[in-house]
Amino acid sequence: MLRLYRSLLRPCTGKVLYCSAQHTSATYLQSFILHNTEVVTEHLTPEIELLLLTPRCKFWHLRPEHWPYGDPYWAIYWPGGQALARYLLDNPDIVRRRRILDLGSGCGAASIAAKMKGASYVVANDIDPVAGAAFGLNCQLNRIDPLPFHPENVIGEDTGCWDLIVLGDMFYDEQLADSLHRWLRHCMVQHGTTVLIGDPGRGHFMTHPIQKQLRKIAEYNLPESSKQENYGLTTSAVWRYEPGCS
């Protein structure tokens, strides 16, 4: 089992550590990613090719401290993100001609799915700049023109009017879940934003008060590889946030 992957299943510490400046240029990062990941289509969205860590990659077997950048959440296609991207691909009306913010975008699959299905404007947002380099490569893989990437934390900020905000696998910490709940409610009340959340049913998500204001709109069986990587999780779902529905 991937030691690095297993370390990522623990709650995020919020610490992001990077190599020296010469090792964070866009060219170097993209070269590093290409040499240490491989193209994967064995997931819920096989029509989207993604550069991910697999058992055939050397860092799969090394101790986490050997990874030279911040925790590579972008290198794993998490179950909530898989369900979310699958839902967007299967329901193009939810994104067609709309402005989309992909919060905590990771590998960028949801952004790519939205653009494939006709979104007018898509921004991928992740606090890890290495995720931005990976996202650019994944756009190229899927023959999509480069999409905007925003590397700052926008939770709690007024980001303007979005038709749709999508986020997957982000309710892994109680404090973060509380912040998300407040901010997503603000976006919806102030701007009429639609919010879709992908999650396989983790504890912090299922027991959080936001559950009273969610409606499950889709559920998918995870592929066998995802089940094994996620300690037996078998399904992942998409939820629509509907404040006041409780």
Image: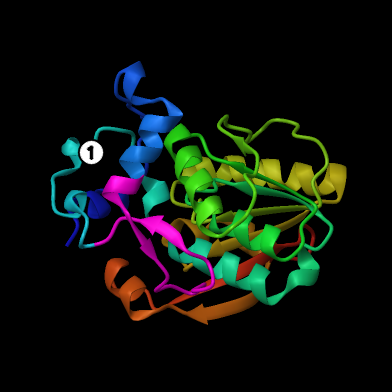
**Is 140 or 202 nearer to us in this picture?**
140
Q: In this view, does 152 lie above or below 170?
A: above
Residue 71 seen in the current view: no
In the displayed structure, would residue 91 be above or below residue 179? below
Q: Which residue is drawn at 39% across and 74% down?
A: 42
**Badge 1 amino acid:** Trp
Q: Mark 1 points at which residue?
A: 67
Task: Give residue 132's position: percent from left, percent from top.
Answer: 50, 39
Q: Quadrant of residue 50?
A: bottom left
Q: In this view, does 157 lie to the left or right of 35?
A: right
Residue 45 lies in the magenta stretch: yes
Q: Residue, x 36% and y 56% (percent of image)?
A: 52
Snapshot quadrant of residue 109? bottom right
Q: Nearer the viewer, residue 83 or 129?
A: 129
Query: What residue is shown at x 54% (from left), y 52% (from top)?
Result: 140
Quarter of the image where the N terminus is located: bottom left
Q: Residues within 10 Å of mark 1 (few under 14, many from 20)?
A: some
Q: Where is residue 38 in the image (x, y as percent from the top left)?
A: 32, 58
Please name whichever residue, 206 or 54, is drawn nearer the observer in this view of the structure.
Answer: 54
Image: magenta residue range: 34-54
Q: Which quadrant of the figure contains the C terminus? A: bottom right
Task: Residue 90: give x, y in percent of width and height.
Answer: 67, 77
Residue at the outermost left position:
62
| Residue at (25% x, 33% y) in the render | 68
Q: Vertical placement of 75 versus 239: above or below? A: above
Q: How many labels does the image show?
A: 1
Residue extending farthest top? 21
The answer to whether residue 162 is magenta is: no
